[in-house]
Image (spheres, helix red, strand yellow):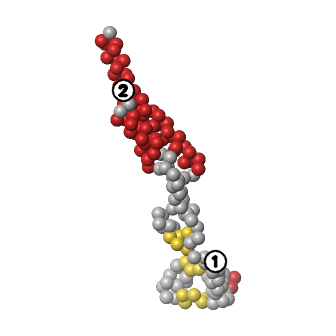
């Protein structure tokens, strides 16, 4: 078998040199002596399953997978609860914020309880429950600040 070097010289190889690096007699460059015989055929690939690209990380994933194994998304969003149990939390927190600050901790509690219930059931927390919880927290902070202010005024005035 013969191979052609980069310098253009044709080099005859011996079967015992197969798979080894040899030196070109013309330019002293390194040449790889291939194995004699026919070139092995390319492996035949099995029929590939349909794929798609992940919209977040652009990796190729199977088309029937609901989520990406590389980045973890997107997965089907949890279904929202049928009823909105967060409405009482919002109403109590708003009433406490606007009229009687003592209701704000109750609204906070109701919003937190609804959030924990939604997590336990595996559904998305409603926006009204989140808003009720946040307004309850803010109202409770204002309630505590007003109590501290009242105590300081009573101590200074007395």
> Residue 21: horizontal and vertical position, in percent?
60, 77
Q: Is residue 21 visible?
A: no
Q: Is residue 98 visible?
A: yes
Q: Quadrant of residue 49?
A: bottom right
The mark that comes first in sequence, 2 or 1, is 1
Decide which of 25, 15 is in the foreground and name it: 15
CB atoms at circles 2 and 1 under 8 Å apart?
Answer: no
Seen at 47% across and 45% down, the residue is 86
* Label 2, residues with CA under 10 Å away: few <14, some 14-19, many ≥20: few
> Residue 95: horizontal and vertical position, in percent?
39, 37
Residue topped by disc 2: 145
Q: Secondary structure at mark 1?
A: loop
> Residue 55: horizontal and vertical position, in percent?
47, 66
* Label 1, residues with CA under 10 Å away: few <14, some 14-19, many ≥20: few
How far separated are the C-alphas under marks 2 and 1?
A: 84 Å
Q: Quadrant of residue 104?
A: top left
How many numbered markers are drawn? 2
Q: For this view, does 110 lie left or right of residue 45? A: left
Seen at 49% across and 49% down, the residue is 84
The C terminus sits in image quarter: top left
The residue lying furthest to the left in this view is 157
Seen at 52% across and 54% down, the residue is 82
Q: For this view, does 76 lie left or right of residue 151? A: right
Decide which of 145, 2 is in the foreground and name it: 145
Residue topped by disc 1: 20
Q: Secondary structure at mark 2?
A: helix
């Amino acid at each position: 078998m013969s191979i052609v070097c980069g310098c253009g010289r044709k080099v005859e190889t011996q079967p015992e040199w197969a798979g080894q690096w040899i030196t070109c007699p013309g330019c002293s460059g390194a040449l790889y002596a291939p194995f004699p015989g026919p070139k092995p055929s390319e492996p035949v690939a099995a029929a590939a399953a349909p794929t798609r690209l992940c919209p977040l990380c652009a990796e190729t994933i199977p088309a029937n997978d609901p989520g990406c194994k590389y980045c973890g998304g997107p997965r089907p969003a949890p279904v929202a609860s049928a009823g909105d149990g967060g409405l009482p939390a919002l109403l109590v927190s708003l009433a406490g914020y606007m009229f009687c600050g003592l209701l704000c901790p109750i609204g906070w509690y109701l919003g937190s309880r609804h959030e924990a219930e939604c997590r336990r059931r595996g559904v998305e927390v409603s926006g009204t429950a989140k808003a009720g919880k946040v307004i309850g927290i803010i109202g409770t902070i204002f309630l505590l600040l007003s109590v501290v202010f009242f105590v300081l005024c009573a101590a200074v005035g007395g």
